[in-house]
Image (cartoon, rainbow, N blue to C red):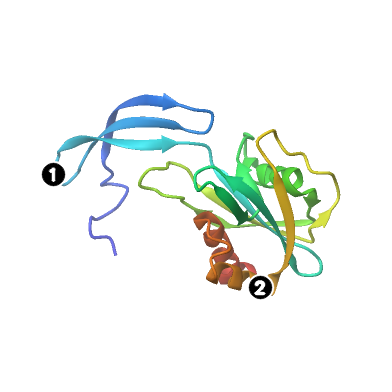
C-alpha cells in the first residue's frame, strides 16, 4: 500500500525554513517544500512544538483518573486525561514527563507504567507526537502542583463507563479519544 514507492525515498525536499512567530507553546514556521512528483516548490506552514504525553491512570478499584480544565481554543471546560508537554530531556523524557504531569495535575502516582503508543495530533500542521502511557495501581499520594494557568477538577470514573463518555461527546478532545482508543484496542490485555 505504497502508491508513491518507498515513503522515505520520496520525501518532499525542504529548504528556506523561516520562523514567522515564536511563542512559549509553539513556533509558526514557513518551509519551502518541493514535490518529488511535480518538482514545484511552494511554502508550507508548520507549528513546531514539543511532544505531548497523556496518562491513562487506573486505580486499584478500576477507576480512571480524569481532569476537567478550561481550554482556551474552544472557550470551554473539557474532560480529559492528565497530561501535558514533554519538558524533560534524554532517553526516558516521555515517561518522566508522564509521571510528572500525573502527579502535578492530580496528586496521583502509579506503580506500573507502560507505553501504549503514539499519535500525531494533526500531521498537516504539527510536527510533534503525543505519547500515551498506561499507569496501573494509581493512588493519591501527594498534593497537586498546578501552575498559574491551571485550575483543574479531578474525577474518578468507572472504567466501564469511559466508552459512553466518548460516545456522548463528554470526552471529545481528539488526542484523548485516540489515547483511550489505544487502551481499548490493546492496552487492557
Which quarter of the figure has residue 135? bottom right
Q: Which residue is drawn at the image coordinates 65% and 42% (left, top)?
A: 92
Tally of marks: 2
- Mark in front: 2 vs 1: 2
Is 46 located above or below residue 160 in the figure?
above
| Quadrant showing the N terminus | bottom left
Q: Which residue is drawn at the image coordinates 62% and 40% (left, top)?
A: 91
Q: Is residue 65 left or right of residue 17?
A: right
Q: Is residue 13 left or right of residue 138?
A: left
In depth, the one of 179 and 92 nearer the eye is 179
Which quarter of the figure has residue 163? bottom right
- Residue 189 visible in the snapshot: no
Give the farthest residue toward the front: 75
Q: Give the Cα separation between the discs numbered 2 and 1.
A: 50 Å
Which quarter of the figure has residue 170? bottom right
Where residue 141 appears, x then y in whole percent? 86, 50
Label 2: state its secondary structure: helix
- Residue marked by disc 1: 38
- Residue marked by disc 2: 161
| Quadrant showing the C terminus | bottom right
- Residue 108 visible in the snapshot: yes
The disc, 2 or 1, on the residue closer to the chain's N-terminal end is 1
Is 107 located above or below residue 171 in the figure?
above
Where residue 37 appears, x then y in whole percent? 16, 47
Where residue 46 appears, x then y in whole percent? 37, 37
Amino acid at each position: 500500500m505504497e502508491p508513491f514507492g518507498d515513503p522515505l525515498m520520496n520525501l518532499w525536499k525542504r529548504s528556506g525554513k523561516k520562523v514567522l512567530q515564536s511563542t512559549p507553546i509553539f513556533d509558526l514556521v514557513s518551509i519551502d517544500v518541493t514535490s518529488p512528483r511535480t518538482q514545484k516548490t511552494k511554502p508550507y506552514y508548520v507549528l513546531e512544538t514539543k511532544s505531548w504525553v497523556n496518562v491513562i491512570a487506573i486505580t486499584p478499584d478500576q477507576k480512571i483518573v480524569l481532569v476537567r480544565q478550561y481550554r482556551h481554543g474552544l472557550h470551554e471546560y473539557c474532560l480529559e486525561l492528565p497530561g501535558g508537554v514533554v519538558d524533560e530531556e534524554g532517553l526516558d523524557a516521555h515517561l518522566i514527563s508522564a509521571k510528572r504531569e500525573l502527579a502535578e495535575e492530580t496528586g496521583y502516582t502509579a506503580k506500573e507504567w507502560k507505553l501504549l503508543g503514539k499519535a500525531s495530533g494533526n500531521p498537516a500542521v504539527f510536527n510533534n507526537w503525543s505519547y500515551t502511557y498506561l499507569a496501573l495501581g494509581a493512588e493519591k499520594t501527594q498534593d497537586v502542583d498546578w501552575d498559574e494557568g491551571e485550575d483543574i477538577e479531578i474525577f474518578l470514573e468507572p472504567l466501564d463507563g469511559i466508552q459512553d463518555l466518548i460516545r456522548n461527546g463528554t470526552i471529545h478532545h481528539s488526542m484523548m479519544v485516540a489515547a483511550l482508543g489505544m487502551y481499548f484496542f490493546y492496552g487492557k490485555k
